[in-house]
Amino acid sequence: MSPRDDVSSASAPSGIGEDERTGRAAWYLIFVLTLAYTASFIDRQVLNLLVGPIKAQYHLSDTKLSLLQGFAFTLSYIAMSPLFGRLADIGNRRNILTLGIVLWSLGTAGCGLARNFGQIFMARLGVGGAEACLTPASWSIISDSFPPSRIPRAFSIYMIGPYLGGGLALIFGGILLNAITEIDRSGWWLFGSLTPWQLVFLMVGTPGIGVALLLRFVKEPVRHETASGAISERATMREVWGGFVARRDFYLNFYGGMALMIIALYGFPAWIPAMLMRQFGMPAATVGLQYGALVLVAGTLGVLSGPWVAARLGARGRGDQLVFVPLVCTLSLVPVSASLLFVSSYPAALAIATLAAYLYSLPQALASAALQLATPNRMRGFASAIYVFAVSITGLGVAPTVVALITDRVFVDEKMVGASLGITCMVACALGAVLLWRCLPAYRRMIGRP
């Protein structure tokens, strides 16, 4: 196989033919799923741009706003992930995705039709619960639509979605809000009574319906095995759980290692802006533009270059590169995070944050591919759901809070938030690297490599 392939063919067991999954249909699937992933991040993050008018209209406190931004979405997202993971293992993944996209699009539109805090909260619950279908069903269907050597590249393109969605939510959300505010809506028959922010929600929720229609042209692929120890087509949850227990040396170390590394992925974007403003006195607009643009570019380059790095290692005979590269990146984040304790200038802090964005983005597609290739087909959806649960708990729950607690309780100085962030990510990534190193032998065994 050419060195240009994303992963050495030796990383997959024999019996999986490169020509079983053809090009056009598979790449059309990636195109549609990337649109869906982008739309999901637009739908979940556009609220952040509209907190001002929502707060003013319903007289909400910052605490209630934070419940809409994080708690309502995360609660239902985590709660529904195992259910969708199980459905992805036993059902038609295309249909699951189609239904989920329609439901979260309707939930986003429902935010615009809400008349009080409670109704917006319920709509956000619906958005989060429906979006829980995306990771388990998408990861599973991608893994069966490509030969093993192409799976990391497919994942890397798919995972551009969050960067596109996060940026577009702010860019086009602001454009829509300003445009609607300036338009005379008095003659609008159906929506004339809605405020501009409500109309933004309605407009942002609409494209998802189109993505769901595009997905109807996708054919549910045949399921392929890449891991040793396959389980039956209609395996019970007891059998599935037994599969996890039998492979616990891989799953415990993999989930733990990646969850600890994800603390950097969530911690840096959450607290670097505050550090740059508090420690160096930079205005919010400048920080938002410069740091936002750098993270967008660095994150996208990181995700796309991951398969290339893995391919180079595969060409040199490394068969465990899909876990080895995340290990190296996690280890590299230790000194990068530690440098935040000593940084003394705004450009240097910005450079550190940009390097961190590249390092924590690079292994994401590879880790996703590794989990799919090492997991029996009828366990993949549930395995992905557990992964989502683990990284959501640590990333959304632990990372921002631990940094804040160190700042408030240890340093008792808000200007020391950069040091708090550095300590948190340094310790987390050091522990994560140990777990990923322990994961390597089990991963090699599960993909049939010595």
Image (cartoon, grey):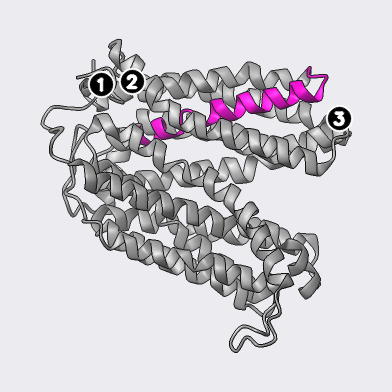
Residue under label 1, please give it.
Answer: 8
Residue with the mark numbered 3 = 280
Q: Name which of mark 2 and mark 3 comes first in the sequence.
A: 3
Q: In the rendering, at what x and y percent does residue 229 appear? A: 19, 35
Q: Amino acid at mark 1?
A: Ser
Q: Cβ–Cβ below 8 Å for labels 1 and 2?
A: yes
Task: Decide whether the magenta segment is chiefly helix, strand or loop.
Answer: helix
Indicate the amino acid at tag 2.
Ala
Residue 63 figure quarter: bottom right
* Magenta residue span: 342-369
As for residue 109 lying within the magenta part, the answer is no
Residue neighbourhood size for the residue with mark 2, other residues' Cα within 10 Å, grouped as few (<14), some (14–19), many (≥20)? many
Q: Amino acid at mark 3?
A: Phe
Q: Is residue 14 left or right of residue 219?
A: left
- Whether residue 78 can be seen here: no
339 relative position to 13: left or right: right
Answer few, some or many: residues within 10 Å of disc 1's Cα (few below 14, many 20 plus, some between 14 and 19): many
Residue 99 in view: yes
Q: CA distance from mark 1 to mark 2?
A: 7 Å
Give residue 288's position: percent from left, percent from top: 73, 42
The residue that label 2 is drawn on is 311
- Residue plotted at (66% across, 84% down): 192
Tell me the quarter of the picture where residue 95 sits: bottom left
Q: Nearer the viewer, residue 121 or 241?
A: 121
Q: Earlier in the sequence, mark 1 or mark 2?
A: 1
